[in-house]
Image (spheres, rainbow, N blue to C red):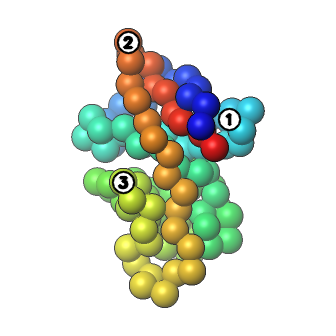
Amino acid sequence: MPRIRVAALADVPPGRMLMVATERGKLVIYNCGGAIYASEQGCPHLGAALDEGVLVGTEVTCPWHHWSFDVTTGECTTNPLAPKSLAIFPVATEGGDIWVDTP
């Protein structure tokens, strides 16, 4: 997987998320108490933009149907029968920048 710089760490304060467009598609970057995570932007249910949802702790809630996903694992936390999980990508922070390994 190629590693790409997606944002400055200062662009995503704790408790916030940021959508970034890359050559490989749109991602959401999450700052969960100083820990940085990245996922696909679209909800795996029906494709809603997760950056328009709500982030509480390490869970993002979809704005359309209120399914929540753990941004550390991608697992749906509100629907045990969810057919898909959220795609999560490895993240590194270096020199104040956020880097993501994308497929």
Badge 2 density bin: few <14, some 14–19, many ≥20, Cα 10 Å: few
Given the image, on which type of amino acid does mark 2 rest? Gly
Quarter of the image where one finds residue 2:
top right
Q: Earlier in the sequence, mark 3 or mark 1?
A: 1
Farthest-out residue, left: 33
Given the image, on which type of amino acid does mark 1 rest? Ala
Which of the pair 52/42 is nearer the observer? 42
- Tag 3 secondary structure: loop
Identified at 56% across, 73% down, the residue is 84
Where residue 13 appears, as percent x and y from the top left, is 36, 31
Which residue is disc 1 drawn over?
A: 21
Which residue is disc 2 drawn over?
A: 95
> In this image, 16 relative to 40: left or right?
left
Q: Earlier in the sequence, mark 1 or mark 2?
A: 1
Which residue is disc 3 drawn over?
A: 72
- Tag 2 secondary structure: loop
Work out how far the residue at label 3 is from the one at label 1, CA to CA, in angstroms: 21 Å
Which of the pair 65/78 is nearer the observer? 78
